[in-house]
Image (spheres, helix red, strand yellow):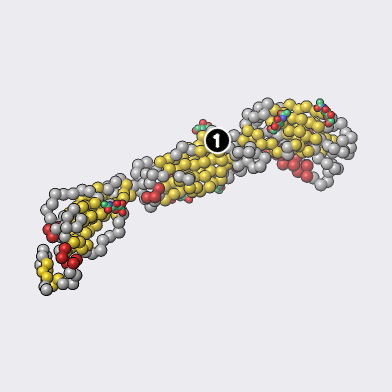
Amino acid sequence: MFCCCIFLAVSLLHSLCLFHVSGYDRSCTEYPVFTPSALIVKYGDPANVTCVVCQKDCSGDVFGLEHAVGKVTQNGTTMFWTVDRLTEWDTYLMCYYNNDAGDQCGSTVDITIYQPPESVSISFVNHTGMMFENQQYTLQCSVQNVAPVQSLTVTFYRGNTALGHLQSNHSEEKKPVNESFTLNITRSREDDGAQYWCEAKLELGPAGPQRPPVVTSEKLPVIVHYGPELKEPPNPDVITITEGDTLHLNCSSVGNPSPSYTWTLPTNSPSYSGSVLTIKSVGFEHEGQYICTVSNPIGTVTKEFNIDVQGECCQILPGKRVTEDQSQYYFTN
Ligand SMILES: *[C@@H]1O[C@H](CO)[C@@H](O)[C@H](O)[C@H]1NC(C)=O
Ligand SMILES: *[C@@H]1O[C@H](CO)[C@@H](O)[C@H](O)[C@H]1NC(C)=O
Ligand SMILES: *[C@@H]1O[C@H](CO)[C@@H](O)[C@H](O)[C@H]1NC(C)=O
Ligand SMILES: *[C@@H]1O[C@H](CO)[C@@H](O)[C@H](O)[C@H]1NC(C)=O
Ligand SMILES: *[C@@H]1O[C@H](CO)[C@@H](O)[C@H](O)[C@H]1NC(C)=O
Ligand SMILES: *[C@@H]1O[C@H](CO)[C@@H](O)[C@H](O)[C@H]1NC(C)=O
Ligand SMILES: *[C@@H]1O[C@H](CO)[C@@H](O)[C@H](O)[C@H]1NC(C)=O
């Protein structure tokens, strides 16, 4: 049985021998025990394992440790396997003995050889040029030369926020592979100025290295283009202000690229292109409609201010106004 085993392909060997190990109809009363029970080794690192062939049923003198690489030393029925540099992706160890009935009782040890990603990079798929809000884009995280890929998880981040957690579903590959993971995202203006990045982590379990190997990508700066939006809510229909007071018309807006401002004024004053229009001391000549137009290459918004100026006296004697003629107030009493 064992002889057939070693000449078969390694994966087949595994399944066959595992079947062998767990067979009910054998006369084996115990099986060799490996310490540790599984090996998780970084590619190129040294490794060792001990096998106690048997503890009670050791009358026979046929036993051993089958190995493709490394060397074995022996002390009684304890076998010690070591390798200086483990550089075989697909290797196996099998410890066995023949019992009195002539049956072979064997165990294998799981060997996982890992290699942290050589590099991790992030990009947008099929995209060049400007990015706009509310549109969908596909982020791609490319992980190169990682093994075993089944233990790989990839997390996409925006700033410190995890956006998605993906796992490879490559089944049994033991050698290093390249794999790309994608995530669809919809851009919002809040993303503007944020950074995207991804992290590749090998999760090898409790028997693996204390700190799971992690490699992160570079950071991808994000620019989202969007049309102007007013920072302040719209105005009441008419803004009433007292003669001599200071008037601020606030049209401040956000947008990317930064918007520009143009004002249409009731009087033929010089043109103005700031975000806030200030009149230090308001006179009746300042009454009327002010229109602020905010634009960038993506869009335009406007804001209207209708200004009504009251005489100072009206504040002192409210309700006494009887007539008005656009520029003056008259009082009775
Ligand atoms: C055997 O492997 C363990 C775990 O890697 C290590 O701590 C120990 O030093 C090794 N022993 C020998 C003799 O190489
Ligand atoms: C072999 O094992 C015995 C008992 O476990 C121990 O006393 C002895 O030192 C070991 N010999 C070597 C060479 O390790
Ligand atoms: C990228 O664009 C090309 C051409 O438009 C298309 O053939 C390809 O499938 C796209 N790739 C992805 C990942 O969407
Ligand atoms: C996982 O497997 C499914 C079905 O085989 C496949 O469509 C999908 O692309 C795989 N995902 C990854 C990340 O490889
Ligand atoms: C992974 O990508 C690198 C660089 O593109 C390439 O040199 C290498 O051969 C690839 N490995 C596999 C397993 O495809
Ligand atoms: C991402 O979006 C593309 C195009 O809309 C779609 O074909 C693809 O299935 C989406 N991928 C995922 C992982 O949702
Ligand atoms: C205009 O409005 C913005 C947004 O609310 C505010 O930050 C700014 O201080 C205001 N400017 C003036 C002069 O009131």
Task: Please provide percent x and percent y for residue 257.
Answer: 30, 45
97 versus 296 height, above or below: above
Please indicate whether residue 94 sits to the left or right of residue 262 in the image: right
Which quarter of the rendered picture does the N terminus lie within? top right
Q: Which residue is mark 1?
A: 117
Q: Residues within 10 Å of mark 1 (few under 14, many from 20)?
A: many
- What residue is rendered at 60% in x and 42% in y? 203
Q: How many marks?
A: 1
Residue 329 place in picture, x, y as percent: 12, 67
Side of 233 where 3 appears, left or right = right
Residue 173 figure quarter = top right
Residue 11 in the image, given as x and y percentages of width and height: 68, 38
Res 199 seen here: yes
Front position in the image: 165 or 251: 251
Tag 1 secondary structure: loop
Q: Is residue 65 above or below residue 220?
A: above
Of 157 and 31, the residue lying toward us: 157
Residue 76 sits in quarter: top right
Residue 69 at least partly seen = no
Q: Residue at x 79, y 31 (%)?
A: 79
Name the residue: 72% across, 41% down. Answer: 15
From the viewer's perspective, tell me whether residue 286 is left or right of residue 41. left
Q: Position of residue 138 (x, y in %)?
A: 44, 46
Amino acid carrying label 1: it is: Pro
The residue depicted at 87 percent of the width and 38 percent of the height is: 56
Along the line of sight, the residue nearer the viewer: 236 or 158: 236
